[in-house]
Image (tube, rainbow, N blue to C red):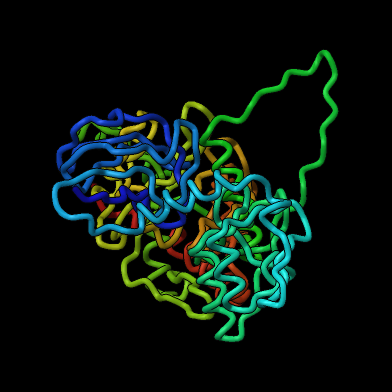
Amino acid sequence: MAIKELLMPNMGESIFEATLLGWLKKEGEEIEADESVLEVATDKVDTEVPSPFEGKLHKMLAQEGDVVKVGDPIALIEVEGEAEEESAVDAQKEVSEEKSIPAPSEAAKPAVSEGPSLVSTGDRFYSPLVKSIAKEEGISQQELDAVSGSGKNGRVTKKDILAYLEERKQGKPATQKMPAVSPVVSGNGASKAAAPAPVSVPVSGSDEVIEMDRMRKMIAERMVQSKQTAPHVTSFVEADVTPIVNWRNKIKEDFKKKNGQNFTFMPIFLEAIAKAIRDFPMMNVQVDGTNIVVKKDINVGMAVALPSGNLIVPVIRNADQLNLTGLAFRINDIAVRARQNQLTVDELQGGTYTVSNIGSFGNLSGTPIIMQPQVGILALGAIVKKPAVIETPDGDMIAIRHKMILSHSYDHRVVDGALGGMFVKRVAEYLESFDTSQTV
């Protein structure tokens, strides 16, 4: 019999971990290929994880409520054949060896004239395998203490020490370990500076303490991660959308009778954004280290408010290839299924730009946070009536116009103020020049 590792699958861009909601199989139960074994959740979607192997659930490596990184093993599957997978067995052996060590103080006795002394300067525990590798490679204890660990409680694993050795060969410095604080991972996988410890909040007897739900915790982490990754700049443009408001008021009842659906402003906004992205393709990029990846498909993420108050961002793929009617159908369908928690993982990944309709909450403008690894997000403010100066053949006049503010946040690492400002201005120009003679 062979032992195969069941790994946490890739759940989409900007998702690096998932919470285990529960096991659908018990240890010792038979599993068919592609049969679901457990249910996991991310900040975007709940989904089941199938087994790529046919066999028996040999051992669960994570329990309900555990947060598991993408690519980490979550179970061992016993399959027919010879024992070819040594990584899973080695991993379990290392865990067993660690548990058999009497105490870190005894396990960390200094070596005598055989390489550097490996006496931990703190309370960090190192497995015999890691210490053996460090000794063979001439790594001092001070140097070992600086290696970032990906194991439980920051433990340095065999994979961590080997990765560090490879980096050391290339002349890269070690990532300094920071006790009791987990590193924040950027959108391109790079470790960022760890966040400071949270400030203690005093609670009196009349205060109510509400624990964040799973999704809110993950959203909070993503927002902090984005602000730590990208220097945010926001540009604002006011657009006169009076012709759009009048045109929509004229066609919305006929559209509903004909198609059984509402026609909102969002299809018009998405059409203008997609056109502007075509004009400024450097807004449709992602950052990979020191490389800029220009995305050819225009996939616009659309923030949707859930009944719980949380937000989810499904993606309208190839938005530039859909007409207004196609956009309306797609937007309505995605919004309904998002609120019913019926979206698939595929519908929540691959976005290249994001739009958030904060005007639906009565907000005039805002400074939205970028969805990593994208470099831009546009907030749509409320449409309000304002007195405005308009040009006529008889001269300037003051009239009541429907106005809205477009708030464009962008990543200043790769998007300068000129590009960020011109982009949002182009969106406003497309809205103000909307063709009111068209039909849907």
Q: How many discs appear?
A: 0
Asked which quadrant contains residue 171, the reply is bottom right
Residue 150, x across and y down, in percent: 55, 56
Residue at 32% across, 58% down: 86
Q: Is residue 206 left or right of residue 6?
A: right
Residue furthest top in the image: 206
Q: Is residue 390 or residue 253 the one in the foreground?
A: 253
Residue at 16% across, 43% down: 54
Q: Is residue 387 or residue 299 the one in the foreground?
A: 299
Residue at 72% across, 58% down: 178
Question: Can residue 155 be seen from the camera position used here?
Answer: yes
Question: Can residue 332 be seen from the camera position used here?
Answer: no
**Placement of 291 over or under 335, stated as above or below:** below
**Placement of 438 over or under 217, stated as above or below:** below
Residue 300, x across and y down, in percent: 39, 56
Q: Is residue 12 left or right of residue 408?
A: left
Q: Is residue 439 left or right of residue 227?
A: left
Residue 368, x across and y down, in percent: 60, 52
Residue at 51% across, 59% down: 372
Q: Is residue 64 or residue 45 the one in the foreground?
A: 64
Residue 420, x across and y down, in percent: 57, 70
Asked which quadrant contains residue 77, the reply is top left
Q: Is residue 176 or residue 94 the one in the foreground?
A: 94
